Amino acid sequence: MTPTIRDVAKRLKLSITTVSRALDGYDDVAEETRERVIRVAREMGYVPRGAARQLRRRRSEAIGYILPTIQPRFSDPFFSEFIAGLGDEAASNNFDLLVSTAPPGEAAEQLLYERWTHSRRVDGMALSRMRRNDWRVEFLSGKKLPFVTMGRSLNSSSHPYIEVDARSGFAALVGHLVERGHRRIAFIGAPPDLMLQSVRLEGYRDGLAAAGIPFDAKLVVEGNLTRQGGYEAARRLLATPDPPSAIIGINDLTAIGAMRAAHEKGLAIGRDLAVAGYDGIEDAEHSRPPLTTLNQPVYEIARRLVKMLLALIANESLAEPQILLQPELIIRESTSP
Amino acid sequence: MTPTIRDVAKRLKLSITTVSRALDGYDDVAEETRERVIRVAREMGYVPRGAARQLRRRRSEAIGYILPTIQPRFSDPFFSEFIAGLGDEAASNNFDLLVSTAPPGEAAEQLLYERWTHSRRVDGMALSRMRRNDWRVEFLSGKKLPFVTMGRSLNSSSHPYIEVDARSGFAALVGHLVERGHRRIAFIGAPPDLMLQSVRLEGYRDGLAAAGIPFDAKLVVEGNLTRQGGYEAARRLLATPDPPSAIIGINDLTAIGAMRAAHEKGLAIGRDLAVAGYDGIEDAEHSRPPLTTLNQPVYEIARRLVKMLLALIANESLAEPQILLQPELIIRESTSP
DNA sequence: TAATTTTTCCAAAACGTTTTGGAAACAAGA
DNA sequence: TCTTGTTTCCAAAACGTTTTGGAAAAATTA
């Protein structure tokens, strides 16, 4: 059906070697023949068969990303933005992006990583939502498969990553709330095995310490990074005898859920209760009231991660293998009516 | 580095044929040898090289999906849910999911489709957000590449698809608003080349007709399926001398943007102005006020689409190639305070 | 003219599987 | 014993590229 390089060669009365080399831009083919080859190849609609090329070249020209699907109905705008970034940058370098899904930390996840690396279906991987002690780091290092991560983990060694300085960000956020007169500031976090939980909780504690406010464990509760989780956690917080006057969500979704709980309680958000989040997703801008948040440029980060990964795959050395970005504090009405 | 089938065969003192057939479950290998083969293969961490298998089998065991990225900062929960569905179902059938991004309707998009089909990198494709006259349908039909679509287009022929009956849904939604006493109901739509715009606008008109309300073109404005687009469109609508008492957004994001515009105008949503959307994304449940919407089970649809696509690839005939689902009207406070 | 270099091409060998078409070994039936 | 099946294995031929290691032809230099 679709023509092979052999068909093109036959039609041109050339060897397949020459056709291949002409198309690949080698300089040992006469300029005139190259033009003929390119013209005829295009005419015939020839595109190299991916599998054959991959087999011979011994690389797949594809990168992989595994989506951490916690729940079936998986709806987190962070990831659609992240994937768009990965996809755009990969596509503009003629790389494919392989996406799969697996609940984090389970056997299925490990199986997937094993299959992709052993079958050489991808030349490298991008990881996100790192765990504190992330087996993936050692696994991929051991397999010598290039990888980059968004955020580091405790066992991160020398692999390239982009980290957003959430710790400073959360400290600044607490500072902002303190400035607004808050003393009882709650924190709705995530499962403790996630690196982002450690980091952001640290930042929260830094902020309290800087303001001379003693840490109160009762003001820290666990969510699950979803709106529903934030909603439920905030309900628990607000039902206590001595409820907080401000709530920080570990991400925007959590904060949005918390706002809903507060509203149901009859609290005026911004006045009776301040709420803030982290991520800077579009929802945060259009929520009611608009949500104070720490913005991180997810799309840009994804693109840069792919750039780094491709350099790694091409065995180039990176000018800046570990990047630290500052999140941008965006103050909106949810803390500042 | 990673062992090939040859290494496994050598270690077992068997031919590679036998190893291959043992692992693939052919019945012309003795049960005892099969067990030995499987055990040793696992011990050695053997996984078939994807490219080699694809080349010989002449199929890639992968399906493709191209994300319609309109803007760089692409954050639509519809798509993260859709991809999660595609990914889960593909993964559980040992298929890979290739994802790329392209602005719809541009040359880059067509190039991508051509590359994927000619290079045989995917065995089939899933399409969404169909256009009225969608060149992709004829293109893929012509290439004889199996594909399924979420929603049909005007030039849809006999390919399998799953369509949610948005037309009836929007009519029912108008009915609900009329019941609540609304007569001036606005519609914030999408670009006119999108099939969903045609269908949903028809449903809106059906609903008006059923209620005996004359169609007023001034109440129909164009958005772009984003929060921001809904926000801007609603501002225009609410600035007119004779503003609507209800606004239907073509999707939930549009409606959420509209709610923000209304709130800024000082309108009490639900009382002064009713707002409703379509999609049933999680945001709609946690917005303020919670949004009346038509729910469609995107995750399930994505999974079913992949099931259909895999059957198509395997040359099986589909019991039900064209499926029509009814969306579920979820009435919340944004229309019913 | 002869020798050398440069240009332009190509045959054949990979890459690592799966599949085809047997062949050997053994068992069963006549 | 001879024939006919079964069972179990395997050599070799694909699949469609890229790459290696020249070789012929043409151009240049001596």
Image (cartoon, coloured by chain):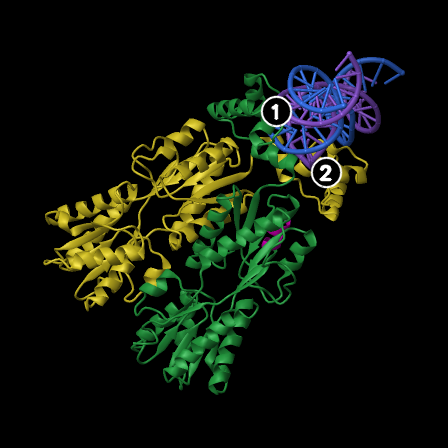
Chain colours: A yellow, B green, C blue, D purple
- Indicate which disc residue A5 carries: 2
- Residue A52: x, y in percent? 64, 35
In the image, the segment drawn in magenta is B108-114
Name the foreground residue: A61 vs A72. Answer: A72
Residue B171 versus residue A118 in the image, above or below: below
Left or right for A137, reference A257: right
User: How far apart are the alpha carbons under marks 2 and 1?
Assistant: 32 Å
Residue A11 in percent (x, y) is at: 80, 40
Amino acid at dot 2: Ile
Whether residue B109 sits left or right of residue A294 in the image: it is: right
Residue B97 pos. (x, y %): 52, 46
In the foreground, C4 or A238: A238
The answer to whether B77 is drawn above or below residue B184 in the figure is above
For residue A203, which quarter of the picture?
Answer: top left
Q: Neighbour class for label 1 at 10 Å: few (<14), some, many (≥20)?
A: some
In the foreground, B220 or B58: B58
Decide: marks 2, 1 in contact (CB < 8 A)? Answer: no
Q: Is residue B216 visible?
A: no
Q: Residues within 10 Å of mark 2 (few under 14, many from 20)?
A: some
Quadrant for residue B73, please give it.
Answer: bottom left
* Quadrant housing residue D2: top right
Amino acid type shown at disc 1:
Thr
Please, which chain is the residue tagged with disc 2 on? A
Task: Note whether A291 is above or below B39 in the view shown.
Answer: below
- What secondary structure is found at the residue carrying circle 2? helix
Q: Is label 2 or label 1 in front?
A: 1
Residue at mark 1: B18
Mark 1 element type: helix
Q: Is residue B277 visible?
A: yes
**Residue B276 disc label:** none
Q: Residue B111 colored magenta?
A: yes
